[in-house]
């Protein structure tokens, strides 16, 4: 038994010595480990005690100074001062004379012939018809001229000019009331409210532009104006009208594109009443006279506006260059709304000044305004005597 224990002890000693030899030999073959640099505490190392920083309230914190940059509002464009009516008429009279003298000169040349036979009178009729005077008015004028020439006997140039001036003036209608009813109502049955003017007409006649120019005419005469952009169907019509208004300080009431025109017109008059202005100008959609639905809508606009009170003026804008086609348009519009006056645009671009006579006779209402160019102040009240002077020339 003791022998066995001795053998076991010797075996353990031998194995321990062998293991030490192997481990030692391995350590001799490995490079020495690099020295450890104590940069950060490792796991298990004792950390330094933390020092709590003093807390600061919001009141004691110094905030950096900040500069708030507020964008500068663009300066409004200076308001324009429209030309007064008197100065405008002088300039337009000269322009009208340059474009319309062919009619008067032609008639004077025919009447000055030594023998006024039937062929000459037929030429006079043709001249008048070509100028869009109209069949009935032409026949009336020729008959009167025939009678006057026989009574006159001797026909000097001065006599013929005076005769023609008198007869043409009678034809144009010097006694028609061409007053624009744009003055504010004060008291009475109409109450205290602005005058309301509807501007109607077919697309392309210059209706929106005429509305803007009319605003300038009224502002030049000392009136305050609100514009109603009830032409909601034509793209940019409201923008165009607003631009006209901004130039003279007139506010524009507008609605959404393709919105209800009657609603816009109603709001414009309501705003005009609230602001106490003199005149509300409502630009309606340029309706084709062949579209019954749109024409009916024009009637609706007028009925809705009349909830505030009667409409003072309904101005029909006609292009003078369209001639007899303009009369067809005038007839249909007159069936829908009661036209109170006519605005003839582009009269400087045509020698057919007789349209003034024919459209007045067709509708039984006077021409109240004429447009003679593209300038902002090229709209003026119609003066029969000045118009006839321009027809005959100097």
Image (cartoon, rainbow, N blue to C red):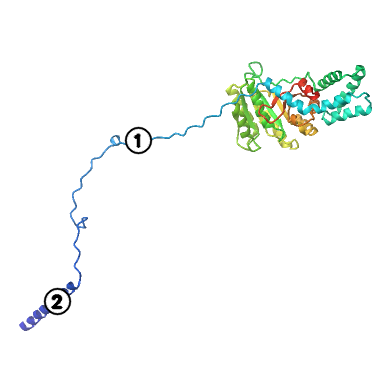
Residue 174, given in percent of the width and then of the height, sits at 78, 19
Q: Quadrant of residue 322?
A: top right
Examine the rendering and report whether any part of residue 359 can be seen.
no
Q: Which residue is mark 1?
A: 65
Q: Is residue 162 above or below residue 43?
A: above
Q: Secondary structure at mark 1?
A: loop
* Left or right of residue 99, residue 309 in this image: left
- Screen quadrant of the N terminus: bottom left
Q: Which mark is residue 201?
A: none
* Left or right of residue 15, residue 259 in this image: right
Residue 230, given in percent of the width and then of the height, sits at 65, 32
Q: Secondary structure at mark 2?
A: helix
* Left or right of residue 194, residue 29 in this image: left
360 or 95, which lies in front? Answer: 95
* Left or right of residue 391, residue 156 in this image: right
Q: Is residue 284 above or below residue 187?
A: below
Q: Which residue is mark 2?
A: 21
Residue 390, given in percent of the width and then of the height, sits at 78, 24
Q: Residues within 10 Å of mark 2 (few under 14, many from 20)?
A: few
Q: Quadrant of residue 200?
A: top right
188 or 73, which lies in front? Answer: 73
């Amino acid at each position: 038994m003791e022998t066995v224990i001795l053998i076991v002890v010797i075996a353990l000693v031998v194995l321990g010595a062998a293991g030490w030899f192997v481990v030692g030999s391995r350590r001799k073959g490995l490079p020495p480990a690099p020295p450890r640099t104590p940069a950060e505490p490792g796991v298990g190392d004792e950390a330094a005690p933390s020092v709590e920083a003093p807390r600061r309230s919001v009141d004691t914190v110094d905030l950096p100074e900040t500069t708030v940059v507020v964008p500068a509002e663009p300066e409004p464009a200076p308001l324009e001062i429209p030309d007064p009516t008197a100065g405008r008429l002088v300039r337009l009279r000269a322009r009208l004379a340059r474009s319309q003298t062919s009619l008067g000169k032609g008639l004077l040349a025919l009447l000055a012939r030594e023998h006024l036979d039937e062929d000459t009178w037929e030429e006079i009729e043709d001249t008048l018809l070509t100028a869009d005077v109209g069949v009935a008015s032409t026949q009336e004028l020729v008959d009167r001229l025939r009678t006057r020439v026989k009574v006159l006997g001797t026909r000097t140039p001065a006599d013929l000019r005076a005769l023609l001036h008198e007869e043409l003036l009678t034809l144009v209608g010097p006694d028609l009331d061409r007053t624009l009813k744009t003055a504010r109502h004060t008291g009475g049955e109409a109450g205290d409210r602005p005058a309301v003017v509807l501007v109607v007409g077919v697309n392309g006649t210059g209706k929106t532009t005429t509305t803007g120019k009319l605003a300038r005419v009224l502002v030049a005469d000392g009136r305050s104006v609100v514009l109603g952009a009830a032409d909601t169907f034509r793209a940019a019509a409201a923008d165009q009208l607003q631009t006209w208004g901004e130039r003279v300080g007139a506010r524009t009431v507008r609605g959404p594109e393709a919105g209800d025109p009657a609603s816009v017109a109603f709001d414009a008059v309501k705003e005009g009443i609230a602001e106490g202005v003199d005149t509300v100008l409502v630009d309606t959609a340029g309706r084709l006279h062949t579209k019954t639905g749109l024409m009916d809508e024009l009637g609706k606009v007028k009925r809705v506006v009349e909830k505030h009170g009667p409409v003072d003026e309904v101005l029909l804008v006609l292009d003078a260059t369209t001639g007899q086609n303009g009369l067809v348009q005038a007839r249909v519009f007159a069936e829908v709304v009661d036209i109170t006056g006519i605005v003839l645009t582009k009269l400087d671009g045509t020698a057919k000044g007789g349209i003034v006579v024919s459209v007045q006779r067709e509708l039984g209402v006077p021409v109240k305004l004429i447009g003679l160019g593209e300038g902002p102040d090229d709209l003026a009240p119609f003066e029969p005597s000045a118009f006839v002077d321009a027809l005959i020339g100097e």
